[in-house]
Each structure stands twice: as structure tokens, then as C-alpha cells.
Amino acid sequence: MATITTTSPRAGGMTKDERFVIFASSLGTVFEWYDFYLYGSLAAIIGAQFFSAYPPATRDIFALLAFAAGFLVRPFGAIVFGRIGDIVGRKYTFLVTILIMGISTFIVGLLPNAATIGIAAPIILIILRLLQGLALGGEYGGAATYVAEHSPPGKRGYYTSFIQTTATLGLFLSLLVILFTRTILGEADFAAWGWRIPFLLSVVLLGVSVVIRLKLNESPVFQKMKDEGKGSKAPLTESFARWSNAKIVLIALFGGVMGQGVVWYTGQFYALFFLQSILKVDGYTANLLIAWSLLLGTGFFIVFGALSDKIGRKPIILAGCLIAALTFFPIFRMISTNANPALEKAIETVKVSVVADPKGCGDLFNPVGTRVFSAPCDLARDFLAKSSVKYDTVAGPAGSPVKISINGTEVPYTKPADSNAGATAALQAAGYPKPGAANTTIVKMNSPIDIFRPQVAAIIGLLFVLVLFVTMVYGPIAAMLVELFPTKIRYTSMSLPYHIGNGWFGGLLPATSFAIVASTGDIYSGLWYPVIFALITVVVGFFFLPETKDVDISK
């Protein structure tokens, strides 16, 4: 890390050139996130289009795995494009990344489905997802570094916080385009062919981004270093093979980015998943609830970025991780109370147990969804978990058949092919709500202006608090990562911990958390994943993460 020098903020506001740098970098990154999130928002429809040769449950698994592939390769994109960015330059590197992302997304919109070209369709789709992940791995580090190296001393947190809004704005934009297209076309046409429109629109966004980025000049800090011949010829070696810098990479990961990543993905993605898959809120309503919370909360990225220029990056990031870890459980319980009160009441009042021979019960932990359960005990618990039923497992006599005990009354478990009609009817008789439209207590929005209904407003308020945590941990993180590393290896060094923390610890959170829910029988147990990792970051960051706000990044 460079030496700390005390600097004073430059008088006056942003110059015209600085505003253009931030606008161009942020706009391109918004479009990259828009492209990346489209797939996640439409995973179920894409699964039906490209994995139609498989049963519905299997095709959903493959669709989610293809989505996860984009997260898994992000650190490799950070390494590849980080090296190029530290050798060739920031401007041209993230010009390449946006081209790869935009073209890959556009091709998804044109790609024939499996019914037309067979096995080639899912293979090409996965290749395109891998390209998207690689491009995103190179984009963020370039944009954050470029903006920071144009920022005046004392304002780097404020300037780079605009980059931090881009992931949320990209998600928000993708949700709006999907909701608008669905509303215009209707569900049937959207599922058949209309889902392609948001992907095809990305070519317009790509064109705008490329034209704007071509007008940018190289980072002055990088150009000065290059002119003086002080650049790195082996940024990977200097970043990761030399302990003096590799140690900072590890501290950045475990003392900052890991906690930031899990708080971010809990507040935005797991919250959406929790509403839809666990509380059974319809997709339109869940997306509108999240969209409103993002609209209300996005400005706080800039608030906390600017605040970090005054009081430091470290206290804001660690405070966000700590407060989130301490409040996730009560907040998600309050979301349940307002979104599906009948389910919340049933969880509290109905005692459900799976009674089975322990030898016939295995482990349900299935974060990537590839395992197929065949033992009756496992099938029964999997059925209850997917029905959002809280249950425990009780040992039965050796060799005894599996039964589901509901408030002391045992119901024989039948195979999924029989629809589990007996168990379902018994659960509903005990107080568990009927699914879908039959449950009139589940929150439902028919239009965006339904936010004035008390039930809706309460949920949006709770989701807004989760977004506020996201802005605390994410607003200052770009400035902190830039300031931790010297100019000649900055792009490479900062990109890898960022994309491991967000792409792996954060990106795999929804699937892993739901796997924890399924294996424990408690709809809230998945929250232990972000709580534990956020608390680890608080401890590691408190003792080892240096404060960076006064670092001279020109060295």
C-alpha cells in the first residue's frame, strides 16, 4: 500500500471533464450489470427454452447452474483483464470488456432454442454466460480504477460511489424492462418469444456505451507512470506471488469484500428469492417490491461514499457488516409477517416432524441442485422445504415407513407422483395456507402505486433497510480497494478479491442459503450464511484492515 499523506479536498465542485469521466464509466457499467442480471431474472423461462429435453425440475437446475457459471468465472476475468489493464491501460481494457458483454447478451436474444438446434443451444448459451462472467470480471476493476485515478484527493469516496450505484441501477433497469415487456405482451407471448426483447435491446445500450467510452482519455495516473517507464511487466507475479502484496489481497478479501459481498447479495438477491420461493409472493409483486426499495435506497451509495471521505472507509464498511449481521433475522421475520402472515402464523403454531428410521435419512444439502433424492425420508423433507413448512426430523423405529407428524397426527408420506395430497391437505387443515391465488393473505401488487397500502409499504420499508445496509458496505468499497494497491498493479490486485468476494461468497449465496433451509427445515436458517461471513469480516477487518482514505494513489 502506498504511503499515507494528508490531503485537503480541492475547492469547488466537479469539473466538466470529471463529470464526463464518471458518467461514461458509470453508464457503461450500468449496461454491463443490466446484461448480466437479465439472465438471472429470466432463468426459469430460459430453462424452458434451452433445456427443454429435461423434466421441469432438472431444466431449472441447469438454468441456475448456467447462471452460476457467470459468477464462478468472474475472478478469472479479473486476472485476465486486470493484467491487460495494468500493462496496456485502463481505457482500452474496459472498452474490450463492454464489447464482449454486449455482444454476448445480444446473441442470447438471437440464439435458437433447443427445439430448433438441439444440444447446440444449451452449449452455446453456457459459452455466452462464461463470456459474460469473464467480461464482468474485468469491467468493474477498470471502471473503479479509472474513476479513482481521475478523482481529486479527498473526494475519491464520493467520485467512485457513482460506480457503486451501477450494479443496483443495472438490476433496476433490467427489472423495469422485463416488467414493461411482460405487461405489454402478456405472460404467454413473453414466455414464448418476448423474453428475447430485453436481450436484443442491449445492442442499443452497447452502441451508446462504446461511442461514449471512445471519447475517454487514458487515466492520467497510469499514463504518467507509463511515460516514466515505471509500469509492471508481470502484474500477476507482483500481485499474488510476492507476500507483501498478496497479504494485502487476502486482508482486502476477508476483512472487507467478503462481508460486503454477502450483505449485498442478501439485501437484493436473497430478499427477492425469499419473497418468491419461500413466501410464495408472485413474481410481478416481488419484482415491484424490490424495484421500489432500490429506487428509494440507491442514492445512499453516494451518501456513504462521500461520508467515507470524511470519517474513513473502514468504519462505515465494518459498521454495515455488523449491523446487518445483528438485524437480518428480525428483519426477514418482519418481512414474512407482512408478506405472508398466514404462513408466518403456521410456522409459529404448527408442529411438523418427519418420523423415519434414521438410517434412511441422508443429507439434503444441495447448493447447486444437482442431487436427486430417492430415499422416502429425503423426499419427504425436500417436499416440506419446498412447501415452506418448518419441520424437524424425529427418529422412528428401525425399518418403519416414513410419516409426517402434524400437531401430533401422523400422515403417511406418499411419493411425489401422488402429489402428496394427504400431507398437503393435513398441512392446510392445521393452518398452512393454500399456495398461489387461493391464499388471499399473500401480499399482491396490481400496479406500482399500490405502495400506499400499509402491508405493501411495510415490506418496502423493510427492504429499504436491507438496501441501506448494502449502500453502507458497498458505497466506500471501490475507493478502499483502489487505495490499498500501488498504481502499477492496482487493476489486477483489486479486481481479484472483489470478484471472489462478490462472485463466489456473494453470488453463490442464494443457492447455498436455500440449501441450508432445505437441510434444516427452518425458512430463516439460510440467513446464517451471510451472518457468519459478515461477522468474520468485522473481526478480520477490525484487526488487520488499514484505513486508506488519506493514501496518495499516484505512486
Image: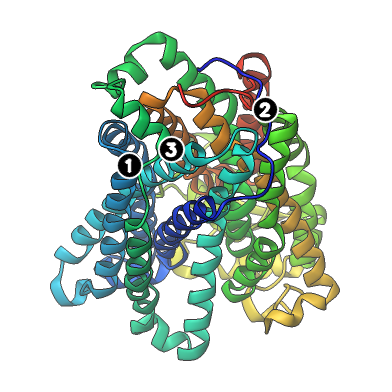
Q: Please tell me which of labels 3 and 1 falls first in the chain.
A: 1
Model colouring = rainbow
- Quarter of the image holding residue 350? bottom right
Residue 193 higher or lower than 523, as above or below: below
The residue wearing badge 1 is: 73
Specify the quadrant of the image occupied by residue 349.
bottom right
Q: Identify which amino acid the numbered label 1 is placed on.
A: Val
Amino acid under disc 2: Lys
Single out the mark in the foreground, 3 or 1.
Answer: 3
Which residue, given by chain and number where applicable, does mark 2 sit on? 314
Q: Position of residue 116 (x, y in %)?
A: 16, 77
The correct choice, above or below, for 19 with respect to 42 in the image is: above
Q: Are the residues flagged by discs 3 and 2 in contact, CB closer than 8 Å?
A: no
Q: CA distance from mark 3 to mark 1?
A: 9 Å
Measured from the top left, where is residue 403 in percent x and y?
60, 52
Element under label 1?
loop
